């Protein structure tokens, strides 16, 4: 138990999106609101408009008696940023002034946000123990030659935005004996597409057009499928009420047949990790894969904190190819947890949204509220003995 003090307020920053009611990430915010009294916290949701606005709203939302109700902005002690796109500088400055004026303290974020996929890849490549897991990656820039990569990896190339989410605007490029090329993927609305291109110039124009719309990275296309369904393994690591990293659990996310990505927003499903891998790789190799995932999940959080500032949770995505080789696909500092809601493990599911509250309480009690966007940490020990509390992987 903790000494009684008046509850402190954590404001969750979310985007106002079309087709969401009343805002994005509603289920996560609702669960935090329902659990927050146990941690002596109040939850206040502040919606950042998706339009090109430069001013904060004057009201937000609180969850009371089973419904979201509009409420004026209260005294705020901690900010949780769940916006999947960067918040404009002007809005962030207003948030700082807002928290300062209401609570009289320097504003703090529950966690920093990781930069784009390219910078994260570069940071992880400095750890020798992780290099064998990393997919060869190239940042697409004017003048960069992607053609030699297509010759080197006949299975094709995979392109994705540096700052993309949910599999949107990703595509694969495959050469058909040099006479034609296939481009298939998902557009900005997450709808599937497939085109045949018959001249080198048309392929070049397609890639150039994609680079114009987004900053992109390119990787070899890996065959990460099971019975025709693409899949990956989401490991969720979170800081607990003592400020220590722990592995909450792992789940497999399986995409629809023929899709390139396994993201649940594209129509995929989730499965317990142990039984799923057992069905494909057998007992001994499944044990090896899970152990390697645990080891990587131990190294990654302190390494990224040393580069980018204090973090609170990470969704770490792994892939396993047809030969059983493990690949580190992506690290996300604002992970979804839909897959864990599908787990046959209520305790693991509950941890996905109670650990953020426990860590928020820890921060407020420890008075470590610093501006996490200006990291001052020294490089930690990233050996397998540091960083992650050793607990079993759930969901099996």
Image (cartoon, grey):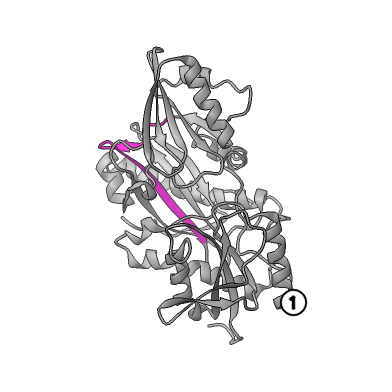
Residue drawn where x is 36% and y is 46% of the image: 266
Say above or below: 383 vs 362.
Answer: above
Taking 64 as reference, is 119 left or right? right
According to the picture, the residue beneath numbered tag 1 turns out to be: 104
Residue drawn where x is 54% and y is 29% of the image: 209
Say above or below: 66 vs 222.
Answer: below
- The quarter in which the C terminus is drawn is bottom left
Q: Start and end of the magenta stretch?
A: 221-238
Residue in the foreground of this view, choosing between 53 and 311:
53
Residue 65 at what x, y percent from top left?
A: 42, 82
Residue in the foreground of this view, choosing between 2 and 361:
361
Report if residue 245 lies within the magenta region. no
Residue 238 at what x, y percent from top left?
A: 51, 60
Say above or below: 94 vs 304.
Answer: below
Residue drawn where x is 50% and y is 33% of the image: 135
Q: Secondary structure at mark 1?
A: loop
């Amino acid at each position: 138990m903790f000494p009684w003090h008046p509850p402190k307020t954590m404001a969750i920053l979310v985007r106002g999106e079309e087709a969401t009611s009343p805002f994005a990430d509603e289920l996560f915010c609702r669960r935090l609101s329902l659990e927050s009294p146990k941690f002596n916290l109040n939850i206040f949701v502040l919606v950042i408009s998706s339009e090109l606005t430069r001013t904060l709203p004057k009201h937000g939302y609180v969850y009371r008696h089973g419904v979201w109700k509009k409420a004026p902005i209260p005294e705020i002690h901690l900010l949780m940023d769940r916006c999947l796109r960067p918040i404009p500088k002007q809005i962030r400055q207003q948030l700082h002034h807002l928290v300062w004026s209401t609570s009289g303290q320097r504003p703090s974020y529950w966690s920093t946000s990781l930069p784009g996929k390219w910078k994260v890849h570069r940071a992880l490549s400095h750890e020798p123990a992780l290099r064998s897991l990393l997919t060869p990656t190239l940042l697409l820039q004017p003048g960069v030659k992607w053609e030699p990569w297509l010759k080197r990896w006949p299975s094709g190339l995979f392109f994705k935005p540096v700052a993309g989410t949910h599999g949107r605007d990703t595509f694969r490029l495959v050469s058909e004996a040099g006479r034609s090329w296939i481009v298939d993927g998902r557009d900005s609305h997450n709808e599937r597409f497939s085109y045949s291109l018959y001249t080198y110039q048309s392929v070049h124009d397609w890639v150039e057009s994609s680079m114009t719309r987004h900053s992109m990275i390119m990787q070899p296309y890996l065959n990460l499928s099971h019975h025709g369904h693409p899949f990956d393994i989401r490991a969720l690591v979170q800081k607990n009420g003592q400020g220590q990293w722990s592995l909450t659990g792992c789940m497999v996310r399986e995409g629809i047949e023929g899709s390139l990505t396994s993201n649940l927003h594209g129509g995929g499903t989730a499965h317990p990790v142990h039984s799923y891998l057992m069905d494909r790789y057998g007992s001994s190799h499944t044990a090896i894969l899970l152990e390697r995932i645990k080891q990587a999940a131990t190294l990654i959080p302190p390494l990224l904190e040393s580069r980018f500032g204090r973090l609170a949770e990470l969704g770490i995505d792994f892939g396993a190819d047809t030969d059983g080789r493990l690949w580190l696909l992506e690290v996300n500092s604002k992970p979804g947890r839909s897959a864990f809601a599908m787990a046959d493990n209520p305790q693991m599911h509950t941890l996905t949204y109670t650990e953020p509250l426990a860590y928020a309480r820890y921060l407020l009690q420890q008075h470590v509220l610093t501006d996490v966007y200006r990291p001052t940490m020294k490089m930690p020990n990233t050996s397998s003995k540091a960083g992650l509390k050793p607990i079993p992987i759930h969901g099996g």
